[in-house]
Amino acid sequence: MALVMFDYDGVIADSLDFHCQDFIAAFHDNGFYGVNTTEELLALYDGNVYASLLEMGLDAGKIEKIMDSYAIKQAKHLAEVNLFDGMAQALASIGKKHKLFIITSNFSNAIFEVMQRFGIDCIVDVIGAEKEISKIKKIRNTISIFPHLPAYYIGDTKGDMLEGKKAGAKTIGVAWGWHGVQKLQEGNPDYIVHTPEELVEVLNG
């Protein structure tokens, strides 16, 4: 048995178009115009998205307002968000053998809603932005609950790989996500997988 922690957007959920639309609109609604394109938004995930925003000059209060706006906009699209092909089956298979968590910069309630819609009940817990903004802290805290289990963090961005490693987990990058293989390799992942079926093989094999 292992502790397997998943990012959500770009790993489980095929949500990039909605995410970009809603996040950029939330920025603009709150008077911030430093992010206007998909490419500029994805660049925030070279590290921790919140740290990236702080580096751009936003303070914690402004970021909180932007995230509140994003949550409202995102809620309107949750019924339209799909999972990547094969991910529901992969989660079910991995969940039979390992303890599964979702650790994300998104909001837990939104993710639970999507998981429920697809009948996914193998996730022990979702640890979202409303609980802690640092993925490193969230991963470390989860590892501390299961110190005897080997720990993996599965993500789709360079930032995911860097944060997972810093938190003490082995990292698995998924090639179907937001950053692609070349950018993932900059985060020096332990594994890169190209399909959900390959992910199952790595974790269950």
Image: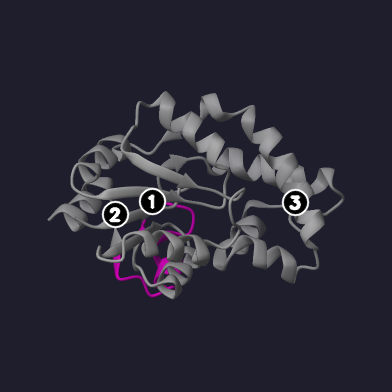
Give the magenta part as a residue range. 174-191
Amino acid type at image mark 3: Glu
* Residue 198, image x, y percentages: 21, 52
Tag shown at residue 176: 1
Check the picture and name the quadrant holding the C terminus: bottom left
Instruction: Indicate left or right for 19 with 67 as reference.
Output: left
Q: Secondary structure at mark 2?
A: loop
State the CA–CA distance, disc 2 to disc 3.
35 Å
Observer-nearest residue: 197 or 131?
131
Q: Residues within 10 Å of mark 2 (few under 14, many from 20)?
A: some
Check the picture and name the quadrant holding the N terminus: bottom left
Q: Residue at x 43, y 73 (%)?
A: 187
User: Circle 2 sits on which residue?
Assistant: 194
Amino acid type at image mark 2: His
Q: Secondary structure at mark 3?
A: helix
Determine if the magenta segment contains residue 178: yes
Q: Indicate which disc, 3 or 1, sits on the residue closer to the N terminus.
A: 3
Q: Indicate which disc, 2 or 3, sits on the residue closer to the N terminus.
A: 3
Q: Residues within 10 Å of mark 1 (few under 14, many from 20)?
A: some
* Disc 1 to disc 2: CB gap under 8 Å: yes
